[in-house]
Amino acid sequence: MILFGLLAGPVFHIVQPGQVLGLGAILGTIALIIILYDAGIDFNPRQAREVGPAGLLLAIGSYTIAVGVLFAVGWYAFAGGDVLVAILFALCLAGVSGAVVLPIARRLRFAPVVRDTLHLDMAVEDTISVLAVTVLLAVVASPNGGWTSVVPQVFLPLPVAIAFGVLGGFAAIEFLSRWQRRVYAGLATMGILFLVYGATQSLGGSGIMAALIMGVVLGNDAFFRRWLPRSTGRDFAFDPSVRQVHNEIAFVLRAIFLVILGVLVPFQPLGIIAAVAVIAIPFVLLLSRRWFLGRLEARRLMEAGNARRLSGLYGRGLTNAVLLILVIAVLPSAQSILLPAFLIIIGTDIIMTVLVFLEPVSEDSAPPAGGGLSDPLDPFRAAAYPPGEAQCDTAPALPSPRPTQELPETLPDPG
């Protein structure tokens, strides 16, 4: 899809970037809504408490270190000394993309506690990335345009988002408990989500945060159902067809967005300093993440022997690209960071792929626990599982034949 966009845009100039930038921003916003909505659905507070210290420290520490590295290099090599552009560059690329990492981690046979720690790390990093960039863009795009508006821009939208997110979650619980097996139930649920987003935005709230909160309420219905009337909120588990509709919608959005991303990537020569920085940043991010994981392991906050394996799962992807497009749509002067950021995303994914390929997979590693966190923040995978349902990486064992089913030693002659 990206290659098709490159051919249609920078190579043959069939489509101009200005013609698709607005559409890219709209699709990017929709993708972020679905990403955070799915993150909320798959978030389990009880399991998060079990791995909370390690997962939260890994997410916050890894993201903070990456922001520092990317800001310093971006300010010097890509942003031309523009502090705001350098900050946005760092915030967009600092978070590891769960949509890229989690499907790979599911196949590496980590112990259940390590998998849950990684899932919580991805959920927190993606959420921090989205909220940090969207809040800063809201401040930049505000009529006041000054840093004095930071506090109201950050804190005033939260009560509105919480209120509409909770109400939307209750409405979705009631709807799905009654009609989720009906045709178009999945589309109707997405309609509730976008209605909540639109209502929140129209009243000055954070629609992105409302989507996250609605997902949390919907994914933890057993806890929130106690506040519903006795006649509503009956027990239910997500029907796979409902989540499948979400995945299919997100897949179409991703395909279109990747084409637009290819159109928007500029073909421009990089200076020597910028080229060296593009090559070095993926390795620096890898080493800094490995160093931080080593510190967590030394303090026994991380299960021993997993720092090296987890550090290699650091690829950037869809979330980072969506945030970059939103930045360029609001701040056209940030166009200069798009090509370096695009190359850095590809570089981290290439290095991660090589490390995973070289990683020996232990056959006696513990399989993932069925009660662990399911893959959050990856709305574009083909399979979806109801909450609490195990995700087995191995095929179920076939039942052994009964004695009466034993085959004869010799087969009769067909002639």
Image (cartoon, rainbow, N blue to C red):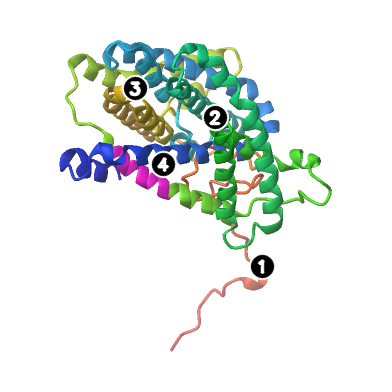
Q: How far across and how far down the image is residue 26, in percent?
A: 41, 40
State if disc 3 and disc 2 touch (CB < 8 Å): no
To which quarter of the image does residue 204 belong? Answer: top right
Q: Is residue 310 above or below residue 106?
A: above
Q: CA distance from mark 3 to mark 1?
A: 56 Å
Reading the image, the residue beneath label 2 is: 118
Q: CA distance from mark 1 to mark 2?
A: 43 Å
Q: Is residue 382 above or below residue 17?
A: below
Of mark 1 and mark 2, the one earlier in the sequence is 2
Relative to residue 400, is residue 147 drawn left or right? Answer: left
| Category of crowding for the residue at label 3, using alpha-carbon neighbours closer than 10 angstroms: few (below 14), some (14–19), many (at least 20) | many
State if disc 2 and disc 1 touch (CB < 8 Å): no
Q: How far across and how far down the image is residue 35, in percent?
A: 51, 38
Frontmost of labels 1 and 4 is 4
Q: What span is colored magenta in the figure?
A: 252-263
Residue at point 80% right, 40% down?
226
The numbered mark at residue 282 is: 3
Reading the image, the residue beneath label 4 is: 27
Of mark 2 and mark 3, the one earlier in the sequence is 2
Of mark 1 and mark 4, the one earlier in the sequence is 4
Q: Is residue 301 above or below residue 117?
A: above
